[in-house]
Amino acid sequence: MNSSSSKEMLIAEKYDLYASLLFRLCVVQLGSISEAEDVVQDCFVKYMTSMPVFNDAEHEKAWFLRVAINRCHDKRRCKFFKDTVPLDSIVQCASSESQGMVLEELSKLPEKYRTPLVLHYVEGYSVKEIASVMDLSESTVKVRLHRAREKLKYEIEEAYVYV
Amino acid sequence: MSEQELYDAVRAITPPPSLRDKVLSKARQCASQRDLVVSRSDRGLDFLFRRIGACTTGCTELNPDYYKNSPSCFMLCDSMNFECESGHMPPQSVLRFGTLQLC
């Protein structure tokens, strides 16, 4: 096997491991499917071009998450992103009306609440791991998780009242 | 809302199969030492072309695969060069925009 095809196989392996996780996180962060696709591509391009060396699998996964979070942050700060409204919507991903409502209310939460919420309740990250990936203190993560949970619960209950 | 509902809703978000092909295509480019170009989404392209406006030559040819409703006739090819279907050269503003990696 030549180095070209082995590199492609390596990327395919990493894609299968991390793409779903990164895509979910990016869609929740950006509220746009097409923007999330771009960020996921950027993550793998960065991996291909820098080929970083990792201590273990967790280190590697944290690196991908960190790159995706930073890239989403850059996107949101970009003037072009601020000046546009996505043509697609996070609700398109839902397979039922109730899921659509959860995703819609989730996308309305402040960004600082969305990422810890998804990492903790969907991806199974501990408070300590989230603090490390997001470069925050553990107490800050705990507070954000608590507030995010309360706010999301309140907003969804309110939404159900009006249905 | 339960934690399970949140879990199920977010897990329903899955990447489109085409994304894997795009990433692996970049891997092939990288392996063959060619310049990497991140292909932008249709929405991004549409936005780009709305910003740069029409071809300076007044050509109205459109690439139907990408931007049927775009006022521009330029297409973004794999080599990151811009050209319209008639082969017209893009204005300098497009080239400058291109060097900014489209935002």
Image: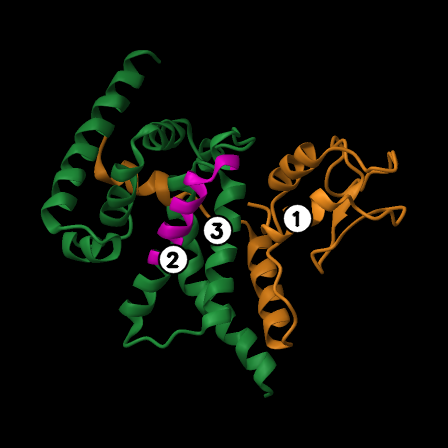
| CB within 8 Å, label 1 to label 2 | no
Q: Give the image location of residue A82, x and y in percent.
A: 47, 32
Q: Looking at the rendering, in which quadrant would you find the C terminus of chain B? A: top right
Residue at x 59% of width, y 51% of height = B101
Q: Nearer the viewer, mark 1 or mark 2?
A: 1
Q: Which chain is green?
A: A
Local secondary structure at mark 1: helix
Span highlighted in magenta in the image: A66-80
Q: Quadrant of residue B54?
A: top right
Q: Is residue B47 left or right of residue A56?
A: right
The chain letter for the residue carrying disc 1 is B
Q: Amino acid at mark 3?
A: Val
Distance Cα–Cα, label 3 vs label 1: 22 Å
Determine which residue is flagged by label 1: B96
Q: Amino acid at mark 2?
A: Val
Tell me the number on the disc at residue A67: 2
Q: Give the image location of residue A143, x and y in percent.
A: 12, 39
Chain B representation colour: orange
In this rendered view, identify the residue nearer to me: B29 or B10.
Answer: B29
